[in-house]
Amino acid sequence: VQLQASGGGLVRGGDSLRLSCTASGRALSTFTIGWFRRAPGKQRTFVASITWSDGKIYNADSVKGRFAISRDTANNRVHLRLDHLTPEDTAVYYCAARSGDNGWRDWGQGTLVTVSS
């Protein structure tokens, strides 16, 4: 699966953004699409995921109530809505795909979110 992440930018604390991940190359019926982020100087961490077939969602505890993942099956896109952003959310956000219970094999190029105080 080829993945293209977009939607990042420079925002102020408290603002919102919507990131998009466009998938191509394969049917997504057996895939889960996830979002991860890597903050400056830190390891990449899981943010949220959604199963394409049934829309089942997992969220990291750190973003529950602020970030929301959704899927657009008509356009092969997964969105990540980021609300109430803080400088601690500054990171490169990546989308990734895995088939069934396999590992996250396919990755997009990342989109940078910078939150100023």
Image: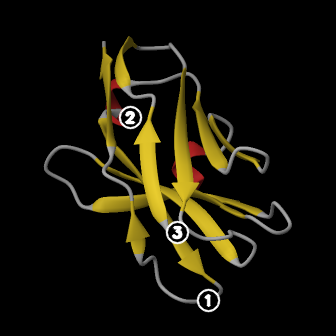
Mark 3 and mark 2: Cα distance apart in space: 22 Å
Residue 16 picture quarter: top right
SS at mark 3? Answer: strand
Q: Dot 2 corresponds to which residue?
A: 89
Q: Where is residue 72 in the image (x, y as percent from the top left)?
A: 75, 44
Task: Decide: is 49 above or below 73.
Answer: below
Q: Which of marks 3 and 2 is nearer the N terminus?
A: 2
Q: How many marks?
A: 3
Residue 114's disc is none
Mark 2: amino acid: Asp
Residue at 71% from the left image edge and 79% from the top image edge: 30
Marks 1 and 2: which is nearer the front? 1
Amino acid at dot 3 = Ala
**Taking 85 as reference, is 109 left or right?**
left
Q: Which residue is drawn at 86% across and 66% down?
A: 54
Residue 84 pos. (x, y %): 55, 21
Task: Label 2: state its secondary structure.
Answer: helix
